[in-house]
Image: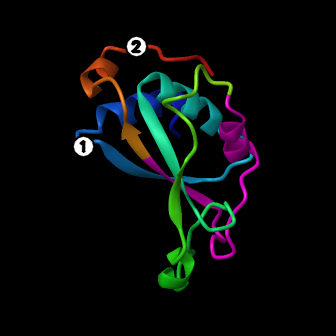
Amino acid sequence: KCYPPTCAVATTMMLPSPRAIVACPFRADSPLLNFFCIAHRLGLEMDRLEDTDGNAAGASSGMDAEEAYSDCRFVKIGGGEVEGCDNSRWEDIAQRPTFGKCNLDNVQMFRVRRVRGESAKARSIRRVDRL
């Protein structure tokens, strides 16, 4: 089990390139909102892969990937321009996500980008936040 502070620091440290893709299955007790806040403080910005209706796009095993992803795009969910962690879009995505018709496994995919700071700075963080 990976807790948000650990995941956020690890994600920041492992981003030698400007971006990575992270898949996150939905859980009722999801720590995703806390992860968004911590990642933002570490200089990361995230986009969610969505279908044309704004649902989390995805394809379950055995589904036609071309059909599932044909009209999908990464949509910014906040970050660089948001001060602090008071972002209602983050809250909706973390606690009340909606999923596309092909996303039967309820997995959200995020593109994570470093917009400020360096991975070396994340190594010096001992405690990012408390759950």
Give me the disc on residue 126: 2
In the depicted structure, whether residue 12 falls above or below residue 93: above
Q: Report which quarter residue 129 is drawn in.
A: top right
Which of the two discs, 1 and 2, labels the residue nearer the N terminus?
A: 1
Q: Is residue 110 left or right of residue 31?
A: left
The crowding category of the residue bearing disc 2, from other C-alpha atoms within 10 Å (few below 14, some 14 to 19, many at least 20), is: few
Residue 29, given in percent of the width and then of the height, sits at 72, 41
Q: Give coordinates of residue 28: x percent, y percent.
A: 74, 46
Q: What kind of residue is marked 2?
A: Arg
Alpha carbons under labels 1 and 2: distance apart: 23 Å
Segment colored magenta: 87-111
Asked if the stretch drawn in magenta spans residue 88, the answer is: yes
What kind of residue is marked 1?
Ser
- Residue drawn 54% across and 84% down? 67
Sort mark 1 into few (<14), some (14-19) or many (20+) by Cα contacts within 10 Å: few
**Residue 17 numbered mark, or none:** 1
Coloration mode:
rainbow
